[in-house]
Image: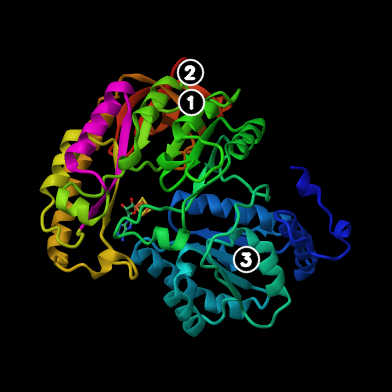
Amino acid sequence: MSDMNFKVSEVYGQAPLKEPQRQLYFIEKCREFVSQIKPEGKPLMLVNTFGCQMNAHDSEKLKGMLLEMGYGEAKSEEEADFIIYNTCCVRENAENKVYGNLGQLKHLKKENSRLKIALCGCMMQQETVIETIKNKYNYVDLVFGTHNLYKLPELLYTAFNSKEPVYEIKTEHGEIVENLPSVRNFEYTASVNIMYGCDNFCSYCIVPYVRGRERSRKPEDILNEIKELVNDGVKEVCLLGQNVNSYGKGLEEKITFAELLRMVNEIPRLERIRFMTSHPKDLSDELIFAMRDCEKVCSHIHLPFQAGNDEILKKMNRHYTKEQYIALTEKLKKYVPGVGITTDIMVGFPGEYDVDDTVDIIKRVRFSGAFTFIYSKRVGTPAAKMPNMPDEKLVKKNFNRVLEVLNPIIFEINSEKVGKTYKVLAEGISGHDKNLLIGRLEDNTLIHFKGNIENIGKIINVKVTDSKTFYLLGEQEDL
Ligand code: 5AD
Ligand code: SF4
């Protein structure tokens, strides 16, 4: 990370054109501003994240850049001098949450004249949202999207120097910028982007429009980042992408996701590897065999199926049938013993009046966990124009039926673990009970357990003593 030591004086006052040097230059420039914001001490910033793991990881990068500029971290919005919302637009209620919170910031701005407010991320890539912010929330100082997230230092510097709000929304992605400052939310586990964007265009999904085309990071950049994380004490990495199974497309060097996994598996002192999300249509035998062969790759896969009915799947543009999906999960179970399969399920897509096939998949696959969603119409996606929206009451009934089948299965799978011993990475102290530690089994099941605090950061044997629907209770062996 020698770039990080870059000094403004070295460019004689001229902003470099190359990245990341350009943003490192603006970090230095912002530092001058930030140091003058609050005579009584460090000004404080708060990054509020909405949405998925990808956003959570982007927020680590935003935070890292802000800390480098000289901000401290605020514990609440009330004490912050800079608030940034990293937004999500995958469903309407995610957007409503952002608007709701944003509305409440207006009075904070009146109370604290130093307060600057920024919005970024997926929601900002939509024209209608930008119009709404300009009209209804004109107290926002800085707005940018997903393609220029790395430009926070330059944009904030512009905002510091401007009386008008600064808006920069790019419709096309540029280069992948490496080596900017970042922080980690957790000490022993870390997320690593392996690719950005999505080319699948599932007909309900806004992601391909707001995150742009699929592009993969070079394997050497990924491997170097992981090696640095390991040097910094990280034991487990999660490789992130909207569809990791299509990793490598478009890179000069020919490489598949399975090959990348095998390379990551060779990194000394790294102990566990996870990845998400996988698309069933691209889940190759090669990947299943890599999961089987690589001892560090955890026996867990997040494999969204969305809906069970073949006609609905076709209208969703998912490129698989119910039976193909089930066959895939059977192959996984055969080659990766003890594999935990989790999924995403959507209810209420246009034309979906019953969930018989969805329930059938749930019963036959037996998921160890699932995120369940009610379909939300997203303007600009093909599904938004599809007829035959089932009525709300029916959707609620179908949704409840899905939960009634799903939750007892998850509970049963957890109950089968009681009395057995599993390898757990002790990640920290449990938020539920300060006397317990928290960790995950290889198959991703969460466990709260009695354990020795000195073992935090280590993989230890934990005996399961009790099960709840969404987590286990346990005790470290030889305590
Ligand atoms: N409505 C409801 N759920 C959605 N998802 C994506 N788009 C929508 C939508 N329009 C869900 C899918 C996806 C997860 C990340 O979010 O289940 O797998
Ligand atoms: Fe959306 Fe489908 Fe891409 Fe997932 S794979 S991000 S659901 S378009």
Sequence-wise first label, 1 or 2: 1
Residue range in magenta is 319-347
Q: Is residue 43 left or right of residue 293?
A: right
Q: Amino acid at mark 1?
A: Gly
- Dot 2 falls on a residue whose secondary structure is loop
Relative depth, front residue between 7 and 407: 7
Q: Is residue 324 magenta?
A: yes
| Residue under pointer 2 | 479
Asked if marks 1 and 2 touch (Cβ < 8 Å), the reply is: yes
The reply to whether residue 320 is in sight is yes
Q: Amino acid at mark 3?
A: Ala
Q: Is residue 74 left or right of residue 349?
A: right
The structure residue drawn at horizontal position 17% and vertical position 38%, both measured from the top left corner, is 323
Where, by quadrant of the figure, is residue 406 drawn? top left
Q: Position of residue 382 (x, y in %)?
A: 28, 65
Confirm if mark 2 falls within 8 A of ligand 1: no
Confirm if mark 3 falls within 8 A of ligand 1: no
Does 457 appear above or below 112? above
